[in-house]
Amino acid sequence: SALTESERTEYINSTLCLMDPERAPAKTGTYGSKSRWDELLVSHVAQVQFIHVTGAFFPWHRWYTRVHENLLRDECGYTGPYPYWDEQADQASAPLQNASVWSTSLTAGFGTGNTDENDCVVDGPFAYLPLNLTTELTRTNNSCMTRVFNQTQFDSVSQEIVDSCMDIDGYWTMWSCLGNTPHTGGHFGVGGTMEHVSFSAFDPIFFLHHTNLDRLWTQWQSMNTTRLTAMGGPLVAPAAPFGTAQPSFLGVDAFVPYFGDNGNITILNHTLWMAGIVDSITVADAMSVDNEGICIKYA
């Protein structure tokens, strides 16, 4: 069920808390991070070539949203349910600009999609949110969080397309369906910052989008118990466009030995890394929502 108004307010306040160096100061300080939010974003930017169009995509992002939830609770006292954006329901019922996540509220929504001449978000609690990191993990003050709604792209998250993905047995073939159209449809539908392979997590709506995607992966897994260990796909994404987005000093040579396998097929004992926010885990550790350290129940 949808969050109540008070739960939405608490969630937004906790998100703003994570962004605040005074209330949630960085603990690792990686690449100039000032807050826990900064550290969370660094972990995404630092490894785009190893967590997109790879077998690790689904388990890494499941773990990422879980780490985000734990930070909200442990650092900022969030007590409500961890939300997802039911994009399929919104796509079926209304235009994107009228989706359930948008609101004029300064305390309980994600803005309305209104932007200035540079596409910077101008309303809601995240108005003019600075995007202060480069793909080389250096700091900048020259950008902001942007959105550019695209209804055609958003229509590709439809339940009809999701249902076609659910009928696929093999993990990597399923990934090529669910990990492509419904996944990219959410990103490219919101557009702007969400459309950038490195910086998409800078938009707080990212986490609601990816929690929904994890909900769909969980549904796929629940249809056959063998899917709880189904893994495959490449360990490293194609050089274009992911190689150019990957920080040049954190290339394949920096990651492949760390994974402990010279092959390019993702397996269950490969390592998942969160840039020091928490200890690394394996792909197997994130394969089930019932696993210790994951513990998710979708309602």
Image: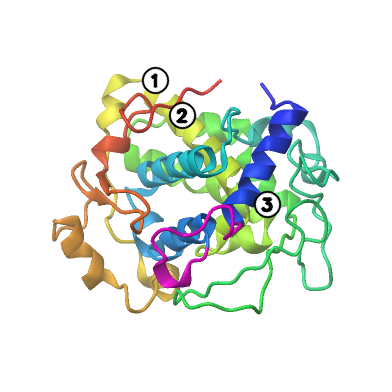
**Between tags 3 and 2, which lies in front?**
3
**Label 2 Cα crowd, 10 Å radius (few <14 / some 14-19 / many 20+):** some
- Identify the residue position indicated by label 3 in the image: 189
Mark sitting earlier along the chain (1/3): 3
Region of the chain picked out in magenta, as a range = 20-34
- Identify the residue position indicated by label 2 in the image: 166
- The residues bearing labels 1 and 3 have C-alpha atoms spaced at a distance of 28 Å
Q: Amino acid at mark 2?
A: Met
Out of 192 and 167, give the one closest to the viewer.
192
| Quadrant (top left, top right, bottom left, bottom right) of the N terminus | top right
Out of 28 and 273, give the one closest to the viewer.
28
**What residue appears at the point 51 percent right and 23 percent down from the top-left corner?**
298
Query: Is residue 74 left or right of 271 when viewed as pictured?
Result: right
Decide: marks 2, 1 in contact (CB < 8 A)? yes
**What residue appears at the point 43 percent right and 46 percent down from the top-left corner?**
64
Query: Residue 29, image x and y in percent?
Result: 42, 66
- Identify the residue position indicated by label 1 in the image: 223
Query: Residue 234, image x and y in percent?
Result: 28, 54
Mark sitting earlier along the chain (3/2): 2
- Secondary structure type for disc 2: helix
67 shown above or below 51:
above
When asked about the image quadrant of residue 9, the answer is: top right
Decide: marks 3, 2 in contact (CB < 8 A)? no
Q: Is residue 26 magenta?
A: yes
Q: Would residue 215 be visible to someone looking at this image?
A: yes
**Label 3 Cα crowd, 10 Å radius (few <14 / some 14-19 / many 20+):** many
Query: Residue 259, image x and y in percent?
Result: 20, 56
Q: Amino acid at mark 3?
A: Gly
